Image: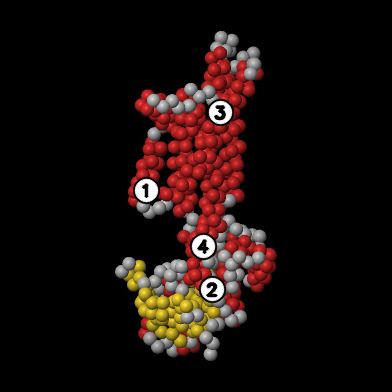
Amino acid sequence: MSETILKIDHLQKQFDSHVILKDVSLSVKKGEVIVIIGPSGCGKSTFLRCINGLEDIQSGDILLENRSIVGNTTQIQKERQRIGMVFQSYDLFPHKTVLDNVTLAPRKVQKRDKAEVEKEGLQLLDRVGLASKQNAYPRQLSGGQKQRVAIVRALAMHPEILLFDEVTAALDPEMVHEVLETMLELARSGNTMLIVTHEMSFARAVADRIVFLDEGGIVEEGTPEEFFEHPKTDRAKKFLASFEYHR
Amino acid sequence: MDLMGIELLFKGQNFLRILGGLWVSVRISLISVAISIGLGLLVGALMTLRRPVVRAITRVYLEIVRIMPQMVLLFIVYFGTTRAFGIHMEAELAAIIVFVFWGTAEMGDLVRSALISIPKHQYESAKALGLSRAQTYRYIILPQTLRRLLPLSINLITRMIKTTSLVMMVGIVEVLKVTQQIIEANRRTSPNAAFGMFAVVFVIYFLVCWPISMLSKKLEKRWSE
């Protein structure tokens, strides 16, 4: 059995007195793909944002290979570079070309050599079929292309864990597929991934484990087969039923 | 033939004198804009702070500048200070002070709006990539802010050049004043010169401001997004 790389321990998050996440614990093994699903407002996005330090937490701990990454010291920020994140709204840097978007952080944060980083950036872009767009600006790309560049930008930092926060939610339906294919490919090649999504068939295909979050807590978790075929809790059943249509 | 006085342009040193006056106008506005951009960056950054006191002060400052005619400010600084405090100030210095007072408020507001128009997600994705705060500002936020700012501040230059026509009221001999002097001096021989010569001034202002305005449009287009 492979080792645990990320451990979330009794995490509690609240905005003022409003509790968003209560006592959430989750262990992620190296190479594991976990899909987090749940109704809107259940705290799934906030959960990812806490892991990446974009939100502070009120209690509990987040451990990356047994070392806490809660807090804002330089050392912790450095540790956090091992976690990459892709957002719903792609958020490429509009004043930089595709290649510059990809190479900026490896060069400035990791101080790597420009030629080497550009070579790798091009290979990564090629992998998602966008090498020809290296000199384009984000505004010249479609939503799906932007999102694939955003994924490449995260990959260029060689993260050990990738977080995906509803990355297809802002895309036109015909662009969703190309982005999900890219993510499936990443999952196949052994990346550790935490994915928040509303695409149920994708969740089923990509996940090693499904985590069902509702009202700020983990209600149920299991393999995709267990969860989708035999949900144990009423809340999960009700949630899954909301995706079905009958006449 | 009646040239409405335009022939005066070619009489003696007149043309050179007008160009000299023009240079005074351009010099005052360039110096003022340069200082205003520097101070405006500072004021604009202050305006984005969530400190009520700082907000109130900058707000009042902005309103004063908007409401008060520049000429009144100019008279206060030039004539007012001489009487009240016994300071004798060069007219050009007084003009620059007023223009900077005005320009800083305008720039500050532009900087503020440029800064807050950068989406929160730009900060977040920079942070998620591991960029430090300083790096985020240097590589992500400031370049985008400046791109939004440059066309607007160029616009401010043209507005300042136009407004320099006021400074003749405190005795600065700029392009409009020179022209007036030329017209006065030739009142007998060319009684219609006011029309022709002021038309010349109009063309001169246009020739100076139009290219600047075009440049600003071009930059705005190139950097739109």
Q: Which residue is mark 4?
A: B132
- The residue singled out by tag 1 in the image is B54
Which secondary structure lies at badge 2? loop
Determine whether, in the image, residue B217 is placed left or right of residue B116: right
Type of residue at label 4?
Ser
Kind of element beneath mark 3 = helix
Q: Identify the amino acid type marked 3.
A: Val
The C terminus of chain B lies in quadrant: bottom right
Where residue A199 appears, x then y in whole percent?
50, 76
Spatial CA distance of label 3 from label 1 is: 36 Å
Give me the chain letter of mark 4. Answer: B
User: Label 3: which residue?
Assistant: B24
Q: CA distance from mark 4 to mark 3?
A: 45 Å
Mark 3 and mark 1 residues within 8 Å of each other at the beta carbon: no
Confirm whether residue A45 shows in the render: no
Q: Which residue is mark 2?
A: A82
